[in-house]
Amino acid sequence: MVIGAKIRDLRKKLGLTQEQLAGDELTKSYVSQVELGRIHPSHKALAVIATRLGKPLGYFLENGDDLRTIEVLLKAAQALWNTGRLDEGMLGLQEALMLAERTGREDILARIKATMGRLEMTQGNLDTALKYLEESLTLIHPNEHPAQAVEIANTLGMLATRSGSFHKAMNSFQQALEYAQRLPDEAADVRAEAAQHYGDFCYSQMQWISALELYQQAMTDPRQLISISRKAELLGRVASTEWQLGHQDKALAAITNALALLDHVKESEEKAAISGDLARVLINIGRFNEAHELLLHSLETFDRLNFHEGQAVILDALLQLSAAAHSPEWLHQYSQRVLRTQNAWPWHSVKLYALRLLARQAVEVGQLEPARDYLADALQFAYDEERIDIECEYYLIRTQLGDSSALDHLWAHIADLKFTNAKPRPFTPRMPKISAPTLSFAGSII
């Protein structure tokens, strides 16, 4: 966008007249000529205009080199994220942030800060993540960039859910739904995703009817523009929710339709991710061998791509399958692979889950000392949000082993006990990839 058009659009957005923008330093005629592109403002005049419009000078200057550098940095950060090198990815994002501040482009600043928030969230730094995401949402203008606003609000909702701020989570998902209504028909998948994330939140809170209504809303598409992959993903969620509601025939019909659609998904990474979701549904309804086959295909894909986050999600589902099928062989096989990974994102929560399952299996066969050791290992790298649950299990086993001092520790934590097998493991939302700051449905930033 040329300088004059930028000045005109921003002036109108702020409700200023050309006289007000000109002030004492310039004239209305001069501002008019600049906005029409008939003259190029001097550096001094542009500095006056920038100050009055509340933007840095770089916002109005040609900054293609900076924008191209930001794009490269974000793509590099994505590659580093996929392979678990989060610290290096964050350094690149901080460099991109400095360049973005120089351009004054709020949409790019919002994108980078949202990405930094997601990276902090994956490392368990929830307060820092919340700060970045809330800043990002205040920077973006939903009327101009609704798709980006939907993505940020959804991510904020996921973070709020994880940190236990359920009211904030609900508000964020509702915001995402509101922003999604501003999207064109061609953005049917983004609108569907907003309703799907809100449905996932309701599902995680065992609000089955609300979750089902949101999933069905997401599939409502009069022009049939929702992609096959999105429809398969949603049908899997409908199947799981119908099963929770006791509607077994409807659940089986939905999962059958979802599996049929899966055959038509072409992109391998997307197919692997959806297969993981559908496998969780098959686990819930007791079709363990089918779930196992789907998960192995998904794991093979993510292994080939060396996509660590995908591997972690699928291995988490394989552990869930091992517990549901009461298969010590599967549990040993997949927990051993998980425990050989690094003590960092994205393996942190999967390792904790594996160690707790191993501890419970050990207790079931009367091997209390190995169970205690598994939980002791888990406590070495548990975040605060998980520590209370694991400590309760740990001190309970120590009590059974005759350690009288463990009772005092157990009593200190028992009131805060939250972990329960009664609550289903929710769907794992697929975090949006770090993308270059190009805007969907609006073209490139350059």
Image (cartoon, rainbow, N blue to C red):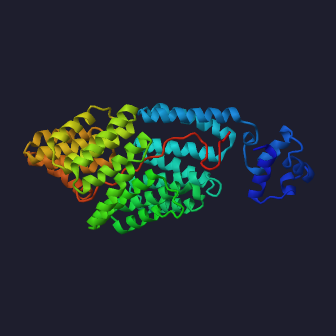
x then y, percent, for residue 115: 52, 43
Image quadrant where one finds the N terminus:
top right
Identify which residue, 419 or 408, lies in the foreground.
Answer: 419
Q: Residue at x 60, y 58 (%)?
A: 184
Q: Quadrant of the C terminus?
A: top right
Q: Is residue 126 visible?
A: yes
**The quarter of the displayed image where residue 41 is located:** top right
Residue placed at 84% from the left, 49% from the top? 35
Q: Is residue 165 rendered to the left or right of residue 30?
A: left
Question: Picture quarter containing residue 354?
Answer: top left
Q: Is residue 24 left or right of residue 204?
A: right
Q: Is residue 404 visible?
A: no
Residue at horizontal 86 percent and vertical 45 percent from the top: 37
Based on the displayed image, in which of its 4 quarters is residue 243 positioned? bottom left
Q: Position of residue 325 (x, y in %)?
A: 18, 49
| Vertical arrangement, residue 218 with respect to residue 387, above or below | below
Residue 189 x/y as whole percent: 51, 54
Residue nearest the viewer, comparing 359 with 145 = 145
Q: Position of residue 244 (x, y in %)?
A: 28, 64
Which residue is at the front of the view, 405 or 6? 6
